[in-house]
Amino acid sequence: MLEGRVLHGAVHGPGEGVVHAAEVAAIRDGYAFDGPALEMGALVNGEAMPDVPVRIPLAMTNRHGLVAGATGTGKTRTLQVLAEQLAAHGVAVFAADIKGDLSGIATPGEGNEKLLERTAGIGQAWEAASFPVEFFSLGGIGRGVPIRATVAGFGPLLLSKVLGLNDTQESSLGLVFHYAENAGLALLDLEDLRAVLQYLTSDEGKGELEGLGGLSKATVGVILRELVAFAEAGADAFFGEPEIDTAEFLRVASDGRGIVSLLEVPGVADRPALYSTFLMWLLADLFNDLPEVGDLDQPKLVFFFDEAHLLFADASKDFLQQVVQTVRLIRSKGVGVFFVTQTPKDVPADVLAQLGSRVQHQLRAFTPDDAKALRATVSTYPRSGYDLEEVLTTLGTGEAIVTVMNEKGAPSPVAWTRLRAPLALMSPSPDAAIDTAVAASPLQAKYGTAIDRESAHELLTAKMNAAAAAAQAAEDAAARAKADAEFAKQQAAIEKQRDREQKAAQAEYDRLMKRTSGTSRSRSTTTRSRSSGGDSVLEQVLGSKATRDVLTTVVEGIFGTRRRR
């Protein structure tokens, strides 16, 4: 306990009350709800007052909340207390387990003398208990059922946020998503998106968006470079199929208790944009899928958004508008959201205005910026009897300033509260127990193995290959046509040369024939004239009778005809 407490500048010694009896009575009445409530702890007024419990109406947990405070002040334990009690009331819980400490919810706590003394002092009957837990991991990075999302399901707005794109680049990315949907190109993973971007700036695809304004090669180059860096940071494992059905986070165990879904996210500091934007995708997906149910007696799901400042860092105006709209409207679908961060100034004012419950742990004011943040935090609380600038810097570990929305929708009085202790283990569950739980999960068979079906990358690769083959075939045909034309030209030249040579030869032949034709005719005439002048001597001898007798004798002797006569 502190040696002095402050009320409007007046210092109170040990054991003295910080607020007067009338204010204590107002706080008692302000937290006396008729319906079921989450027990947060007991009022501190010099000492803890177990007869003045501080509570949150269960029906008001869909009005959202904030758990804030410096590192080491007990935010994680507050989150665990809330998660345990929500589960006990049959409300499903989703939380990111940044440090691994929340995994202890699956294991009964370990009591000790100091713990029991503290819990008895605030009227808590502590008894060790465990709660049903489902372990998840981002894309299988770590232990747990893999959570994946398709690029199309993630959408251009969230992807632009995680890639750090400016307004122009975000608009161009939205155009790419629009084209892919209309063209029947499924965007399942980052490789699909890269394929579409490259196609739309290629010779084959650059005309596809002319009617919609087209794409700048420089803009596409920036997006592609950011996608490469994003993939190298581990995002490739997260995008793909099977895509998680966010209804899995609304399950209730067989004994009626809500299942606590814990997302293991080791190394958040290495990939803060992926982590925070992924959680926002889960909320947006829940918002899109769940039906309107109005104000229920208790929510279907309470979603704890740890390290919430990562979500809003460097966020575009459009992105912040989307977050505000989602937070404002998702309560009517039975979902409550608690942001967990260091100071309320980490959360935009429009979002902060939607948060009904506030649990503020100790703040530190070591620097001028710290002091400024402290004053800004105080200004967001209702008027009270506390000097909050002083109180917020003197709260002990496990203590907080609390105000909630009562059952009528009005803020409850501000209460300095000593918070209850979790019933489950306040350190991580043993690795073997987690591994056993993951292996036994019915979701492992459904989501454990990645699926790679035909999508934009395969379709565009086939299209580009077909176009390349067609272009090559056309080029080959053109080359063949050119070769055929050259051959025909050469053949024509050869034929022409041959005709010239034949004509020249014929002309030469005709010339020679002409020169020799007169001499031949005179020689023939002379021969004929000599023959017509009378028979030659030979003809006269052969034609005589004596010659014919001699020839007859010779012929008969040769053939032997004469002997047979």
Image: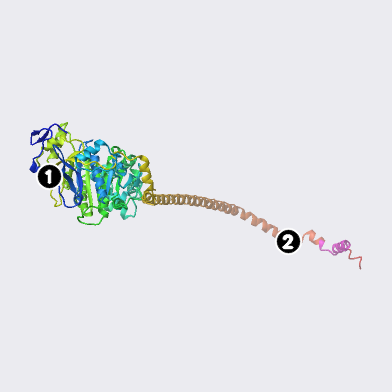
* Sequence-first tag of 2 and 1: 1
Q: Quadrant of residue 54?
A: top left
Circle count: 2
Can residue 315 be seen from the camera position used here?
no
User: From this viewpoint, which residue is outermost toward the bottom?
Assistant: 565
Q: Residues within 10 Å of mark 2 (few under 14, many from 20)?
A: few
Q: Position of residue 300 (x, y in %)?
A: 25, 53
On the image, the x and y values in percent for residue 184 come to 34, 55
Residue 558 forms part of the magenta stretch: yes
Q: Quadrant of residue 45?
A: top left
Across and down, in percent, residue 308 comes to: 23, 42
Quadrant (top left, top right, bottom left, bottom right) of the N terminus: top left
The answer to whether residue 39 shows anywhere in this view is: yes
Asked whether 161 or 369 is in front, the reply is: 369
- Residue assigned mark 1: 27
Q: How is the image coloured?
A: rainbow
- Label 2 amino acid? Gly
| Magenta residue span | 542-559
Give the quadrant of the C terminus.
bottom right
The answer to whether residue 485 is left or right of residue 509 is: left
Q: Main secondary structure of the magenta part?
A: helix
Residue 350 lies in the magenta-colored region: no
Left or right: 84, with 25 as reference point: right
- Residue highlighted by disc 2: 533
